Amino acid sequence: MKLERSLNHETANEVIVLEMGSETSLVQRMTGEHMRCSHAFALGVDGLARQCLQHEPVWPIELEHAIDLTEEVVMPLAPQFANTHGLVLQGMGATLIATTLRACGISQSVLTLDEVEALFNRLVAVSQGRPASQEKLPTDVRFVGAILMLREVMHHLGMAVVTLPTNTRDISV
């Protein structure tokens, strides 16, 4: 997906773009089409799942370990990337989140931090024993890892909203 399509009406404003990959991710501060700064980090959806999330549904201790690992990577980014209102999510993790949420009947392309927190809390409830069928969310470790990474980035970098990709029909994850 091209950046200009992702930014749609926000192209004149400053946004953070997070390309969430399988083993690595990239965060960029953009003003319109101009990149102001960029940082790649060695944490992606599959890497996080492989290192921390061993069970389906995940165990609470696995979530805690995944949060700790993600915070170690994300918190040092705050001086360069914090306090920008919008986050645009791209890459394999973005596609995974968007297609999974649509399959669960959640078709929004923009989510607030509170909505991402609520999704994560539903996954936590399943990890603590709530039947997954009651939450109607998958227990797939890749999905859990992607939501966890998104939550940590939004929380620690002060992002109010995230824009998900809208055209994911032709992309496999």
Image (cartoon, rainbow, N blue to C red):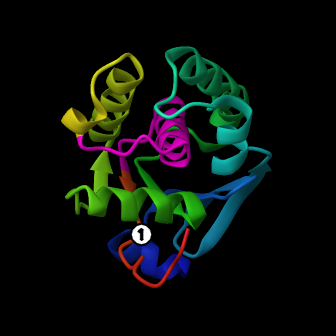
From the viewer's side, name the closer residue of 112 and 123: 123
Which residue is rendered at x = 63% and y = 48% of the image? 45
Q: Nearer the viewer, residue 101 or 20?
A: 101
- The quadrant in which residue 38 appears is bottom right
Q: Amino acid at mark 1?
A: Pro
Tell me, yes or no, if residue 109 can be seen here. Answer: no
The x and y percentages for residue 70 are 65, 31
Q: Is residue 112 left or right of residue 143?
A: left
At mark 1, the secondary structure is loop
The reply to whether the magenta stretch includes residue 148 is yes
Specify whether 153 is left or right of 23.
left
Residue 14 position, x and y percent, is 49, 59
In the image, residue 84 sits, relative to residue 74, either above or below, namely below
Magenta stretch holds residue 158 = yes
* Residue drawn at 34 percent across, 40 percent down: 116
Give, as a single range, the part of the protein colored magenta: 136-161
Q: Residue furthest bottom?
A: 170
Q: Which residue occupies 32% across, 56% down? A: 101
- Vertical arrangement, residue 7 with respect to residue 117, above or below: below
Provide residue 59's location: percent of width, then percent of height: 52, 21
Report the label total.
1
Q: Position of residue 81 (x, y in %)?
A: 61, 43
Question: What is the crowding at mark 1: few (fewer than 14 residues within 10 Å), some, or many (at least 20)?
Answer: many
Q: Is residue 142 visible?
A: yes
Please state which of residues 91 and 47 is positioned toward the viewer in this rendering: 47
* Residue at position x 68%, y 60% in the image: 36
Q: Quadrant of the C terminus?
A: bottom right
Q: Quadrant of residue 69?
A: top right
* Residue holding disc 1: 165
Side of 104 relative to 148 (left or right): left
- Type of secondary structure dominating the magenta stretch: helix
